[in-house]
Image (spheres, coloured by chain):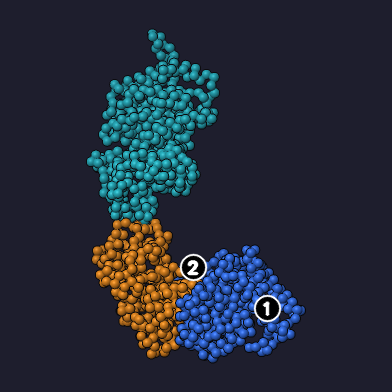
Chain colours: A orange, B blue, C cyan
Amino acid sequence: MATFREAIRSAMRQAMREDPRVFLIGEDVGHYGGAFAVSRGLLEELGPERIRDAPLSEAGFTGAGIGAAIGGMRPIVEVMTVNFALLALDQILNNAATLLHMSGGQVSVPVVFRMTTGAGKQIAAQHSHSLECYFAHIPGLKCLAPATVQDARDMVLGALADPDPVCIFEHALLYNLEGALDEEAAPADPWRAAVRREGRDLTLATYGGSLGKCLDAAAALAADGVEAEVLDLRSLRPLDRPAIAASVEKTRRLVVVDEGWRTGGLSAEIITSALESSFYALDAVPRRVCTAEVPIPYAKHMEEHALPKVAEIVAAAKEALRG
Amino acid sequence: MSLDDLGRDGAHALLREMLLIRRFEEKCAELYTQQKIRGFLHLYIGEEAIAVGALSALTADDNVLSTYREHGHALARGLGAGPIMAEMYGKAGGCALGRGGSMHLFDASRRFYGGNAIVGGHLPLAVGLALADKMLGRKAVTACFFGDGATAEGVFHESLNLAALWKLPVLFLCENNLYAMGTAIELHAADTEISRRPRAFGIPAERVDGMDVVAVERAVRYAAEAAREGEGPRFLELMTYRFRAHSMYDAELYRSKAEVQRWKERDPIQLFERALRERGWLDDDARARVENDVLGEVEAAVRFAEESPWEALEDLEKHVYVRRVGADEGGA
Amino acid sequence: MAELVFEMPSLGADMEAGTLVAWRVALGDAVRRGDVIAEVETEKGVIDVEVFADGVVSALLVEPGTKVPVGTALAKLETGGTAGSGAAPEAGSGSSVGSGSGSSESVSESSASVSESVSESVSESVSESESVSESVSESVSESVSESVSESVSESVSESVSESVSESVSGAGARAGAGARDFVRVTPAARALADARGVDLRGLVGTGREGVILLADVERARERPVEATPAARQHARERGVDLTQVRGSRPHGVIGREDVARVASTAAPSPVDASPESRMRAAIANAMARSKREIPHYYLTHTVDLSRATVFLETRNAGKPPEARVLLAALLLRSTALALRKHPELNAHWTEGQAAPRESIDLGLAISLRGGGLVAPAIPRTDTLDLDALMAAMVDVVERARRGALRASEMAPGSLTVTSLGERGVDVVVPVILPPQVAMVGFGTPARRPWVVGDVVVPRPVITLSLAADHRVTDGHLGARFLARIASYLESPETS
């Protein structure tokens, strides 16, 4: 058993021991031990060159990570939260995602961006948003969202093994999640969705921090005789569209649970994909449970109210059963 | 390095390189009017001494990053007039397969990383490339060209700080042509003496006459040596002027013809030519030979571009990823 | 613009599926109500199927050669109506509208149960002119088809509009927010309904706001049977499985007539039987049912055709063969006119009583060369003058022979006329074609000794016969009816 946080740390440690080109760069990753304590202890093990504290210069150190990747390294850039990554979005989009194509295939950028996402810790609007869809929109990037302890490890290793820039979105509430961790296993293919619970009545498609809510909702539904299938998308770009189609064609009903906002969000892309592939299999209007269209508030009761809730997922599922 | 150190042949090489850039870009302007070249076309004419002087002071192991006004740097780095011209045509024979165009010339084999058109956006890349060299124990420097306009960007300051903080071998080469597009430096900089800013980060910096190719070569050589020896980044403010519009044509409402004329009297090619004649290293015959040689190369480049094929449409989605994964695997 | 779905029509109660033989329209064609837009092959042969609305063909959904269940969407029309305008059935309000299947129930009987003593005289005499009258029949058939489609579409639109308006208002009530211009159904449910030929209009959705779910379609075949008490009793008596009966009443409720139809066609027939043997089986069922259920009474009446013969000779004198009117037309017209005076015989027996019919559409028994019989109706027979009637007969016989009858013509007519002229029989004793309540037969016209005053003279005579349903009329009325036909034949210029 290990925590989600330990699983990421384990993967980074393993990668840095095996490959001298791998290093971690980011705000407070070294002496502080990581804003979310993910890299705690690594500085002592691996030294300040490999565990490189960066000033509060998101564009600067993200761009430096990209430059180092071009120069032959395998950097892991930790951005404290996805909200701050907007300061580096120019680097991620205009450089990391673009250089390979713009250079006619000459300049590849094997860099990994790790960033925290999601709400639930009462840290208010500028630290709590789920902006994965901004990144999943960009050709040239690959995007992963681990939802289990094993995936937290496997996805770091899978991303480092990839020759293209990869974003990993770690939900802040998952770091304390405990689960089985096999540190010896060959990392699972991170690019395919996984069915976390089988069911025949409807598909709950989700990723990252909402997986637990969906599993809870599925359990509640099962008590009422409804068998929900829970699909963990895992890769947000490329989306595993065949897996979405297969599950929806089996259950004929789709509810997407996404902590991002509804408008223009990933839920829209997932549902559209299901409509394109499986329209005639559908026996219900696809539904989505998303975050309320407000900046995430500080007050606990309001924050909880804004986020997707198990009861909402159950209600949406039951609605879907009625067409 | 002085003129004496250069020697006659070295001096002729610099002259030829500057003249190649000048004639190449004059040809580009002509081809633009014939619609052979489209999009933005930012000409370097007037600033040739910087690219030629700086790049003649670097080695093949060094990294070079430039701006969207990079034809001169690309030519001086040896990308070849043909592939550069073909790139501007958008042809498959271009140095970026026609994906980049005038603003995005690349040649990874020559460590030439663009051709970057987000102003200041490549400065962090230069920091990262230098970081990689340092971590991998390579004795290379990274030369990063940018304009005075970029010094107002946040990443300019972030990058100077990072490079200084980590003592990285970066050469920050600021081509101060006095205008950020159409905004004069007095209107965009609280302190117009840009070379004072790096000193706040502890980076040695100096102002150099960017119209004097020998002065540029000498300054860059010294700076590169220091950086290469692990002394950290260096900053040069290279004073220059672009003779033509920001892009192909503009109304030049932001500056006077008299000002342009004054600067043209310090045309770097003419200045250098005069110095060579005074030294007795150049006569009319030699000058004509250089001219013909350069014109021939430009003509060959145009021929190369004209004859180069177009990339196949089905290749559109190539080079988005090195490796397609997951559900994308079926794709290009 | 409203959209109208054109479905595979039911061309008989026993028809579950049909093969689309050919489209007679193309995408984008403007069609008018009554236009034939497709040919459909059934066990009875190829039938021209017409449409009952004006519009533009916006989609052809089924490829020729495809066999699809009744109710399958075949095509879509853009009609001029606005969605939700309600009352006018042809506006359709987007609801699917069949192609007149409402009036063509029990075609199996009409096509099959003609007569024990089958006559071919009408068709034979018609076919004589067939070879030489192409151009005329073409020009005539235009005007005929116009009136045909009019009359048919009227009668059809009544029954269709009833069911449509009901299903639409039903959906509206379920939606709870005014009429919707489409059936609310999930994509999966629609796909299954299409595959199984389930009529979505007949389903009650159990989803939110009444949306039809996949499960509703799956249950469609096992849903509780809704039938009238009379239907249930009849089913018990006849051993009919009500779940196998398609209800024709509003909301799919099964009426007694629906059970009767199934009972009459329920005789076992091998699945792989040839069309001929299946037709034979259908005839057997219909005739058996007729003899079992209908208390026939029979009357005959012999009439002098001298004046009729002279009338026709005079009328046809100097005309080319294709413009001539044959005796068959005169017989039919006389019958139609007589029926006007005796509307009691123009009825259908349904649910234990006679339902009067409004228009006079005489059925014409036509024997097919490959064997079997059909009895297409000639719409509004009484409104056609002799020339028009002649043309209509030529047309319908010709199309019956090549299997190109229209769906509306396969509806049971007012009463059926059969003739075995040219076969030498004296008297035809007909078997009534259910649900009709009477049938008229003509023997062979022949010169016979005839008493005029006190003198016996040779005269061309013909014997008329009537078989009538004693539950509906008595012999007295039947006799007056026959006498009325006779009087028209005796003074043809007045008819």
Which sits in the foreground, B224 or A154?
A: B224
Identify residue for label 2.
Answer: B330
Q: Nearer the viewer, mark 2 or mark 1?
A: 1
Secondary structure at numbered mark 2: loop
Query: Mark 1 belongs to which amino acid?
Result: Gln
Q: CA distance from mark 2 to mark 1?
A: 58 Å
Q: Is residue C288 above or below residue C456?
A: below
Which sits in the foreground, C297 or B319?
A: B319
Which sits in the foreground, C494 or C54?
A: C54
Pick whichever of labels 2 and 1 is earlier in the sequence.
1
Mark 2 crowdedness (10 Å alpha carbons): few <14, some 14-19, many ≥20: few
**Furthest-right residue in view?**
B285
Residue drawn at x 58%, y 83% as measured from the top left: B208
Q: Chain of mark 2?
A: B
Residue C443: tell me if it is visible.
Answer: no
Identify residue for label 1.
Answer: B270
In which quarter of the view is residue B206 placed?
A: bottom right
Relative image position of residue A289 (x, y in whole percent): 32, 64
In which quarter of the view is residue A229 placed?
A: bottom left
Residue drawn at x 46%, y 40% as measured from the top left: C31
